[in-house]
Amino acid sequence: MKKKLMQWLSLAIFAAALWLLYHELKAYHYHDIFRQIKNLSAAKILAAFVLMLGGYTMMTGYDLLAIRYLGHALRRTQVMFTAFIVYALGNTISHPVVTSALRYRLYSLLGLSAIEVAQLVAFCGATFWLGILALGGFIFTFAPPVLPASFSVHGLSTRGLGAIFLLVLSSYVAGVWLYKRRLTIANWEFALPAPPIALGQILASSLDWVCASGTFYVLLPAHQAISYPHFLGLFLLAYTLSILSQVPGGVGVLETLLIVLLKPYLPADAVLGAILVYRVIYYLFPLAIAGILLTGQEFRRRQTALQQTFELVNRWLSPIIPELFAAMIFLGGIILLFSGATPPVGSRFEVLKDLLPLPVIELSHFLGSIAGVGLLLLARGLQRRLDGAYVLTMILLGAGTVFSVLKGFDYEEALILTLMLFALFLCRTQFYRQTSFLNERFTPGWGIAIAGVLVCSLWLGFFAHKHVTYAHELWWQFSLHGNAPRALRASVGAIIVVGCLAFVKLLRPVAPPPVSVSPEDLSKIRSLVSTSPRSEAHLALLGDKRFLLSPQATAFIMYGVEGQNWIALGDPIGAESEYAELVWQFRELCDRHDGWPVFHEVSTRYLPLYIDQGLTLLKLGEDARVPLATFSLEGSQHKSQRYIVRKFEKEGSQFEVLPADAVAALLPELQRISDDWLARKNTSEKRFSLGFFNPEYLMQTPLGIVHHQGNIVAFANLWCSGQQAELSIDLMRYTSEAPANVMEYLFVQLMLWGKQQGYAWFSLGMAPLSGIENRIAAPLWNRVSNLLFQHGEHFYNFQGLRQYKEKFDPVWEPKYLASPGGIRLPQVLAGLSALISGGMKGVLTK
């Protein structure tokens, strides 16, 4: 709810800024703004570029200081290269999750751990604000800027704000100078930087802000109208408020604030013209350079070690590549739409009209906007890794490049789209899902973003052509200088495309509830279980699960539904080539039914599949597997097990493995043993991730039994995996008359039998909550789990179970829960417990 409220608040601030911007500019014509841009001299442009380079150099200094603070010895060129890419992309995208993820991917390649990258991010964030505190504190206190009457708020004092800034800055400096111990804030332990590093933070950030403000200041038409110190105070105030607005990049908000604050000194068209050039120089130009550098770096790696680079990209950048390309292609759609809503540059159009016939220009203008709205819609498909969306995006980017040239010779626009096309081409393998784009569900956030761009495009078109009086005849006017009719037709065409897609989605039938699989599909599932190298696949035979089969019926997911929780058990079973698409299909199935995708007891091998879904990983415990090739009763470490086997043999006990077709005759006796065991344990049958007494289930697997004095006293059904990869047991029951240590005797005999049959591993099952470390920087789940493992004997014998399995010298492999995080996690855990226990009543009782 908080996230949605912040999104709506940011949207409201953005809308208010647009309205105020329109109010301030309504007296001006767009020609006035372009005239201001055209009047900028080459010297001013050059000075702005020099100051921009100085600003980005200071920003890379943030990271150099952070690396020094962390005590790493990275090469300065490596740090500056990485920092420039991060800041160039971060200033434009302005999304903390994406920029932090990009920083982690790049710095982890240089040897930094996740915790060190987190410390670097926090250090650079603090450095960013120290410059505002220093410059703003001194200027607001000793030379407070005069705010215009339209901006004044009762009680607002820039001098008081400056005093607060200086107080915070002084507290930081004093703490750095005097406090030498480590600090702990919200379970995060860190040391304050040394005084020289802290002074470097203040200096680098202050110079960064001087260069950033100077880049904009030199683009203003008349410097004598306002002094630089006065301007710097207003710039810092506007920039700080735009950051607090939570609008990405401060787009619209920063422009509005600067126009209002500078209104007493400069006309609005002059300020907006300077802002547009400032955005290009300080944001778009570094973004293009960073994209080229990042692409060139990857291309060089492909030349030297092609296969290694692909593996590196898949491992480190795979989770964020769809998000980055979705944002980039969405931006490409905005460029085409906004270009279609505004007139072309006059001088270029004069050249173009002599080369091309009018129908080509008209059609290119219209289709350019259609391609733009197509890119907005396809960005969602790229985020979901759809191969169809990838192909269509490549086509539309190529077409958009051609249309940009034909409709007005917009070569800058064509260059940007070409770079996007090239970058997307290099990442072809990241978009592999063979799913219909029309089946994709657009979230409210995507809907709001697309609608917002269309509204902005319409507003831009009306503003750019407000001198033209609307008439019905505009729709049918086709002339070389008919810019307003072209923009009107292009905007309406884009809206019709979006409306048609929305209409098609509204007419689609409601997703039917999942139905049981057919007998033919059940037969295929049994076949996949019998050939799977993982013994836990036999849980599909319990009869308490639903199934999602791959289109080729060569893999499946078994799952259960509890409330909104759609819980898949383990990794997919079957052909590994189908796993990625199958996991996405399960996610879409959950989305269609407003469910939450949850994957229970998944292995480390396939964790990237769940990370791609944006799921949170929690360690559940560790699975014990005994390598049977080295297992024996020889040696001092197996002395107790040797003793148990000899003792049972002396007492006349016998071990036997019965084939599945011999189990039916023993079902009444097995039922009696099971009932006796449940009564003595005062518990009920568990389900889903554990087997329960089900005659049909037991008759599908072999059975290990122990005879004592002519009677069956213990049994366990066997999971025999395909390719003799693994042997395991599920349902274990014994009577009250069974000798002590009967289950350990059964375990040992089964391992010896499995070794004789040629099985590679014997699975002892999972030890819940084991292997979860309680570190200072560990998340809350790890701390609670470790506490339960150490002191939770009242609820479950966690440590005892781990120690019991340790006697067999197993190899421990971690198991995870992949689920939605945040406030949903307690509901997920409650739903999982209810599914395993047969309802909430089973959770509250035994």
Image (cartoon, grey):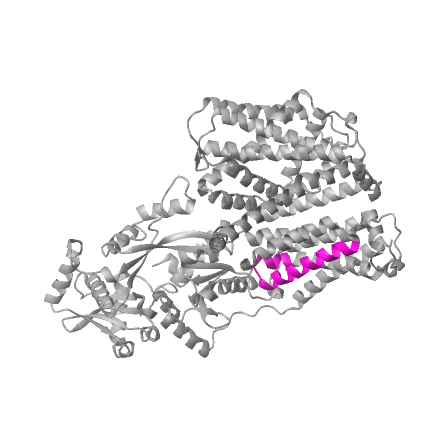
- Residue sitting at 43 percent across and 25 percent down? 180
Residue 619 makes an appearance in the image: yes
**841 displayed left or right of 631:** right
* Most distant residue in the left direction: 650
- Residue sitting at 62 percent across and 23 percent down? 163
- Residue sitting at 71 percent across and 42 percent down? 252
- Give the overall secondary structure of the magenta segment: helix
Quadrant of res 681: bottom left
Residue 391 magenta-highlighted: yes
Quadrant of res 397: bottom right
Q: Position of residue 668 (x, y in %)?
A: 26, 76
Q: Position of residue 217 (x, y in %)?
A: 72, 31
Residue 1 makes an appearance in the image: no
Q: How many marks?
A: 0
Q: Is residue 796 above or below residue 104?
A: below
* Most distant residue in the front direction: 304
Quadrant of image for the C terminus: bottom left
* Most distant residue in the top direction: 142
Region of the chain picked out in magenta, as a range: 378-407
| Frontmost residue, 722 versus 67 | 67
| Frontmost residue, 708 versus 378 | 378
| Frontmost residue, 725 versus 709 | 725
Q: Position of residue 48 (x, y in %)?
A: 70, 34
**739 displayed left or right of 194:** left
Q: Position of residue 576 (x, y in %)?
A: 44, 65
Residue 405 magenta-highlighted: yes
- Residue sitting at 19 percent across and 63 percent down? 745
**812 displayed left or right of 440:** left
